[in-house]
Structure formats: structure tokens, C-alpha cells
Amino acid sequence: MSFSAVRKHTTMSKSPAPPPNTEDAPIGERLQKILARAGIASRRAAETIILEGRVQVNGQTVTELGTRADITRDHIRVDGKLLHGPEPTKYFMVNKPRGYVTTLDDPEHRPTVMQLLGQDKQKKIIGEHSKFPRLYPVGRLDYLSEGLLLMTNDGELANKLSKAATGVLKTYLVKVSGAPTPEAIDQIRRGIMIDRGRLADTRSTGRRDRVLTQPAKVEQVRGGDNPWYEVTLTEGRNRQLRKMFEEIGHHVEKIRRIGYGALTLDVPPGGFRELLPGEVQALSRAAAGKKVERKKVLPEAAQLKKPVPPKRKFRPRTGAPPRRRPS
């Protein structure tokens, strides 16, 4: 028998590959994803809730992040409350004023962004008998900053938008003390070394963990002794704008976020509105790293107010007699 015949015979007698073992395939979704879709918390915050032992599945406390469950079959409780499936997803743009903290509850009892979405204001926006789901801020604006803030119960989208790797464009109006040199502004454009993390942590430990920022787009939009700049970032590190300008020797006086992905700020300070379906779709595209377009004409809320001219002081004419008060 020839070699080719032997080869043909062995090839034809080869048994087919066994089907994959479906019993080992994971069933259900990860718990943190279920909690996020149910509006309990963002996915990252849901992981903390699980690790703290606050979640039960079919009566058993779960503290392992890889645990999966099926919301249609399993009884899932958070802090003793039974989940009833995912809430309808909602998305809102909020114009955060200066002096509010971007958190759900503040231990120092400062005003929070949640107070901007109070029950009385909700009724005017979504109707007398409607009610908001539990919303969470996407990213942060610090206490002294203002402007565009996203609020949603879509934990999956919020998690994607918050990751620096997605490169979602965020645009700010920044007022600084003193006029930086063109060379200093070029440093920010190229990327500049700043301290990583919170300033309080750096001071308490005495260690400085430095990181190079991503290139930024910087344009001066108003001159003067204390100029304004429009700065566009693709990342959102803690107090990043303030740290960047401090590195070139200039204190930041004001920050207002006017753009996020395809969104442009178009509600007055303290106001909010629900996003349109097309705007939500544009956010999803931005979270996937795809290019999106913003409005070419800036709404009033995203513009700098015109400077108020100084009041003229009254000066009497030279040689004119002084005015007498009527008796």
C-alpha cells in the first residue's frame, strides 16, 4: 500500500471533534453589572457594596466579585431589599453651580448635586406623577467648579465614559490668576507632569507620585490680567486643571465645564433636562471611542458673559461752581 493511501485512510477515519461542554459555560451576569443596571450604584461602587457583604443571592451573602446571578430566577437583595429587575435608564444634563459637591450624600452637610434634582423641580420637568430613578453622577466636578454634569442610572455607560482610555472629550472654560507665557501654555498642550491622586494624600504621606498628562487643546478666549482659556481634555484626573496651571505658576480662579462628548451645556445654572435619544446614542458612540460632533453655535450657558464696563465717576467741570443743595 502506498504512503498516500495510508494517509488518505487515516484522514477519513478521523473522528469528529466533540461538542463544547455547555455545562461549564457561565450562567447569568456578574452581580456588579446587575446592581448597576438596577440603579443601585455605578459598577465600581457596586463592587464595593459586594465586598462589604451587603448583597445576598438566594439567602446567601456574597462577597466575591466574580459571582454571577440571573435576575429573572434568583432572589437578589441589597441591604435586605429585594431587586425587582432593571429600572428604565434615564440620562440628565445638570448645570452644577459653584458651591455644590458631586456626591449623593456629604458628611460635611454641604449642598449636593442631588438637591438640584429635588422633588419639586422634578415635577416641573417630568410631570406630577412621575418619579426619578436613583441617579448617579458620571465623573466629578469639584466643590468650586461649575458646569455640565451627567446624571444617570445606566451604570454600564457611566463606567465606560469614566475610563480615560475611551478618550471622551471634555471642554472647560478656565480663568487663571496672572497671564501665563506662550511657552508655559505650550507645556500644557504637550503634556505636563502633575501629582497623581488627591492633594491631601500627598501631604499626609509626604510622597509625590507624578504622572504625565495627555496632550490638551488650549485656546485663549479672553485676555487681560486674569485671562480665560478654553481647555479640552481627554482624561479626568483629580483636580487636573488646577494642578496643570499650578505647575506653570498660575492659580485657577474659576472652572466651568461646557462640553462632554457630543453634549454642549445648554441649561441655566442649577437647571437640568433629560437627554434626547440621539444625545444618548452619541454618548454611547463617544464611550466606544468613536468621533462625535458638537453644536457649532454655543448656547448662552456655554458662553462667557460679556465684561461689565466700569462705572464712570462723576467729575465736576473745571471752573464750574459747586452744586448747591436745595434748601
Image (cartoon, rainbow, N blue to C red):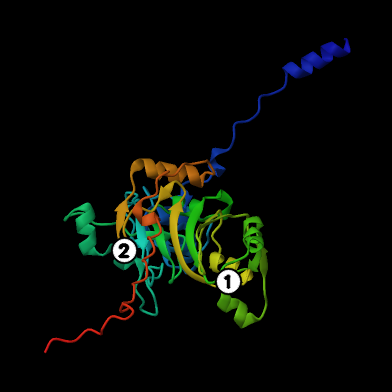
**Which residue matches tag 1?**
250
Task: Give SS at disc 1.
Answer: loop
Using residue 181 as the reference point, say whether residue 306 is left or right of it.
left
Q: Mark 1 and 2 residues: CB-CB less than 8 Å, in contact?
A: no
Of residues 316 and 178, the one nearer the viewer is: 316
Of residues 22 and 102, the one nearer the viewer is: 102
Q: Residue at x 37, y 72 (%)?
A: 105
Q: Residues within 10 Å of mark 1 (few under 14, many from 20)?
A: some
| Location of residue 209 by image quarter | bottom right
Q: Residue furthest right?
A: 2
- Residue 194 at x, y percent in the picture: 64, 67
Q: Quadrant of the C terminus?
A: bottom left
Q: Residue at x 63, y 64 (%)?
A: 181
**Which residue matches tag 2?**
270
Of residues 167 and 61, the one nearer the viewer is: 167
- Identify whether 263 is placed above or below 132: above
Q: Residue at x 58, y 71 (%)?
A: 250
Determine the CA span between mark 1 and mark 2.
29 Å
